[in-house]
Amino acid sequence: MSVAWMGLLAASAFGAIVSLGVHAGYPWVRRWLIDLPATLRTRLVFALVAAPAVFGVVLSLLAVLPGVAAPLAPALDHCTHHGDHHFHLCLVHGPGSIQLNRTWLALGLFATPVLIRVAFAVARLLRGRRLLSALRRSARPTAANYHEVASEAPFAVTAGLWRPRVYVTSGLLRLLDDTSRAAVLAHEAAHVRRRDPLMKLLAELLSAFHLPKTRQALLADLSLACEQACDEEAAVSVGDRTAVADALVKLGRLVSDASPTGTAAVARFGEGSITARVHALLERPKALPWLPSARLTLAASLVLATVLIAPLHHTTETVLGTLFG
């Protein structure tokens, strides 16, 4: 079996370990996340959603890097240090003897549930595309940067990945006073600016690597954080947090029940817990805590990766050789 396939196996193993770590730690981390501003909470929850996939790939690349670099820089080839009896994750020496049955079984056990969840996400995306096509056919643009849909069903959605648009039904517009209309449109405009439909689709795909209970909790918390972040922007736009809360109380349940469901790449006004969103609006805006800058985080990550390369490579060889050699 090639080094590439063994790298894939390593990525699966690292991803599974990170997934188990998130599963064990998220109930405690969530208590801290709840007290953060919604915009920051959105980023952190999305990072947790993506953690198994991202760390699985990154750690496997770090583990394979010395073996891939060995043909170019022989000084990096440490395979001769531990003899031919050891499993080699190296292009020069090759992996060595591998139990293929065990390898394919391990890959199958990991990949099967992931592929099933991805298939369901793709099916939801296709339904979303059909919904978007239907909305575009029946909608007319307005001067207020939204598209009015000729329908008595009261709902407001933001749909589309690269160029999302706001769609509001004529039935909902008839139910809104001026303040509530401004709140709903400002909320949906925030979804457009943040490209929330695209982020939610990516989250649904990346969350396939999590255990079912944790996946459900992460996606629900991400959806709520997105909605609360847009509520905050709507409150700033309208200039009255209470007015946005009042619009949620009056229209949230009605819009949620009427909105299309079972689709991906769509953000809806009535998503998330209405009670939690109203409570957040009636409280003072949360202050941002201190966090390290992006440059500092990147620099620390590069230093840590440099330190980990050699021990990670050797440990991965040892574990894979023990399990599959």
Image: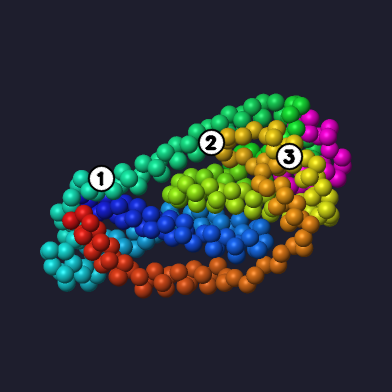
Which dot, 3 or 1, sits closer to the camera?
3
Q: Mark 2 points at which residue?
A: 125
Residue 293 numbered mark, or none: none
Q: How far apart are marks 3 and 2 (CA)?
A: 24 Å
At 37% from the left and 61% from the top, the residue drawn is 59
Secondary element under disc 3, as helix, strand or loop, is helix
Question: Is tag 3's residue or tag 2's residue first in the polypeptide sequence?
Answer: 2
Q: Mark 1 points at which residue?
A: 104
What amino acid is at disc 1?
Trp
Task: Please state the extent of the stretch shown in magenta in the rendering.
Answer: 169-190
> Seen in the image, is 262 located left or right of residue 119?
right
Question: Is tag 1's residue or tag 2's residue first in the polypeptide sequence?
Answer: 1
Question: Is tag 3's residue or tag 1's residue first in the polypeptide sequence?
Answer: 1
> Seen in the image, is 321 located left or right of residue 11?
left
Q: Mark 3 points at which residue?
A: 253
At 49% from the left and 62% from the top, the residue drawn is 25
> Seen in the image, is 270 located left or right of residue 321?
right
Which corner quadrant of the image does residue 166 belong to?
top right
Q: Are the residues flagged by discs 1 and 2 in contact, CB closer than 8 Å?
A: no
At 75% from the left and 55% from the top, the residue drawn is 279
Residue 189 vertical placement versus 127 (above, below):
below
Please name whichever residue, 141 or 44, is drawn nearer the observer in this view of the structure. Answer: 44
Q: How far apart are marks 1 and 2 (CA)?
A: 30 Å
Q: Please tell me whether the stretch drawn in magenta is mainly helix, strand or loop.
A: helix
